[in-house]
Image (tube, coloured by chain):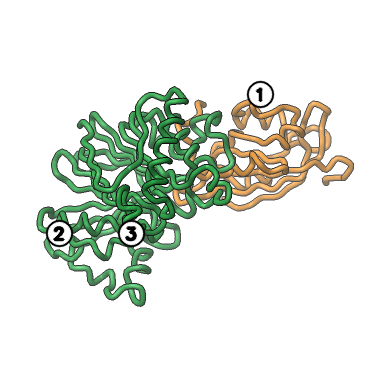
């Protein structure tokens, strides 16, 4: 799907914030498309956003997960981003994501971006739990 | 459409001889459409003199408020048409999830800040939420969108068949980003401003002042010039002048803006907005 002529202000301001913080974070629109992730997230994922561009939900969920420790896809219900986008409230969870080095455990919190016109997407911060048991 | 500047100052009026050349009244721009409909952008102190000029001459007035900071609504109580029972005034503006536009304005037009209550205004006054798809006023298409400023703030674009005006008086699109390289879709206000015949844009601070005022919701001169260039507007007018900037300093700012503009290879023109200035936009 083509990028809109202008993103909602809620996403623009969230991207401005993400671009300058050191905590890994991604920004998704209301359809679940990744529309930005910051350099800290790029370090975990192994690729900078500038190289990747927008990533539709079907593609990044297939490639990045979330997975269980055996690499099986987790059901979307109850996952942080799903809670944020479907229920409009913050979601939190632990799971595995797939990167170049294989599966790594991560912890994530998703915040819905709701403005006067409604839900525009979500901001997801996450951090690696390598060396810990995420279960 | 005819565009007349009745107030070009930001934050607080700047009375006195030192600012009289560019003007000391706060934000107010009059748009008179081809069918003589009066559309007024913001109700800063400049609207008082506009009201005096309109008194007895118009029956329908639309006021488009970008936001409710005092420098954009202070003149409302002194706008003569609001005291004429034969006039219909529609006030458009942002509405927060918690409070309606009328309720928010009533916090200013009510005791103890005002001798009159909003319900006592003699004119037929109505209040409309401007957060909606495009609508039409006097043959112009009006579009509003949230823009980057402190608090809920709208920018406006008014378009006829042959001309368009974009009004972004309080706007900080460059906060935390490089406006030169950012994808246009991620620039606040871009869709409203794109290829406008006339862009009226915040340029409150000089670049060295901006460093200590980052996040206050206003643009540095460099960011204002860059935004105008990226928008592709044909004519940019720098607006919301800082009350501490006297005429001499503003003329120097205007010259710097022109130099930046010319140096960037942008087409069109850039200049200071001045109180009393009138422009005829084709169409």
* Count of marks placed on residues: 3
Residue where numbered disc 3 is placed: B15
The subunit letter for the residue under badge 3 reads B
The subunit letter for the residue under badge 2 reads B
Tell me which residue sits at (21%, 38%) in the image. B1
Residue where numbered disc 1 is placed: A51
Q: How far from the left and from the top, in percent, is residue A120?
A: 52, 43
Q: Is residue A59 left or right of residue B260?
A: right
Residue where numbered disc 2 is placed: B87
Q: Quadrant of residue A105?
A: top right
Local crowd at mark 3 within 10 Å, few (<14), some, or many (≥20)? few
B258 and B229: which is toward the camera? B258
- Chain identifier for the orange-coloured part of the image: A
Tell me which residue sits at (77%, 41%) in the image. A95
B98 and A61: which is toward the camera? B98
Q: Are marks 3 and 2 in contact (CB under 8 Å)?
A: no
Q: Are marks 3 and 2 on the same chain?
A: yes
- Chain identifier for the green-coloured part of the image: B
Q: How far from the left and from the top, in percent, is residue A34?
A: 61, 34
Tell me which residue sits at (49%, 41%) in the image. B173
Q: How far from the left and from the top, in percent, is residue B212?
A: 57, 51
């Amino acid at each position: 799907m083509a990028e809109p002529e202008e993103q909602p202000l809620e996403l623009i301001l969230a991207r401005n914030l993400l671009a300058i913080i050191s905590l890994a974070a991604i920004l998704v629109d209301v359809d679940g498309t990744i529309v930005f992730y910051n350099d800290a997230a790029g370090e975990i994922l192994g690729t900078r956003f500038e190289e990747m561009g927008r990533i539709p939900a079907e593609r990044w969920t297939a490639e990045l997960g979330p997975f269980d420790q055996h690499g099986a896809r987790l059901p979307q219900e109850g996952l942080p981003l799903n809670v944020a986008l479907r229920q409009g409230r913050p979601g939190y969870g632990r799971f595995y994501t797939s990167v170049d080095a294989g599966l790594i455990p991560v912890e994530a919190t998703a915040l819905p971006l709701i403005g006067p016109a409604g839900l525009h997407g979500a901001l997801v911060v996450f951090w690696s739990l390598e060396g810990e048991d995420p279960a | 459409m005819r565009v007349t500047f009745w107030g070009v100052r930001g934050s607080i009026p700047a009375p006195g001889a030192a600012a009289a050349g560019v003007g000391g009244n706060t934000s107010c721009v009059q748009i008179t459409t081809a069918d003589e409909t009066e559309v007024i952008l913001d109700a800063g102190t400049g609207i008082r003199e506009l009201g005096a000029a309109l008194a007895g001459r118009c029956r329908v007035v639309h006021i488009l408020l970008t936001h409710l900071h005092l420098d954009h609504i202070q003149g409302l109580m002194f706008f003569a048409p609001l005291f004429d029972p034969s006039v219909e005034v529609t006030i458009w503006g942002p509405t927060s999830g918690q409070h309606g536009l009328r309720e928010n304005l009533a916090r200013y037009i009510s005791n103890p800040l005002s001798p009159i209550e909003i319900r006592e205004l003699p004119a037929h006054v109505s209040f409309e939420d401007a957060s909606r798809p495009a609508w039409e006023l006097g043959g112009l298409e009006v579009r509003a969108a949230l823009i980057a400023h402190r608090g809920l703030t709208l920018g406006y674009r008014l378009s006829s068949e042959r001309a368009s005006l974009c009004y972004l008086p309080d706007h900080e699109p460059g906060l935390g980003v490089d406006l030169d390289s950012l994808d246009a879709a991620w620039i606040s206000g871009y869709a409203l401003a794109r290829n406008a015949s006339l862009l009226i844009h915040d340029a409150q601070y000089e670049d060295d002042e901006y460093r200590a005022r980052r996040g206050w919701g206003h643009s540095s001169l460099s960011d204002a010039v860059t935004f105008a260039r990226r928008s592709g507007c044909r004519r940019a007018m720098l607006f919301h002048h800082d009350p501490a900037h006297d005429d001499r300093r503003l003329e120097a700012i205007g010259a710097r803006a022109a130099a930046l503009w010319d140096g960037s290879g942008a087409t069109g023109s850039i200049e200071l907005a001045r109180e009393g200035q009138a422009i005829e936009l084709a169409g």
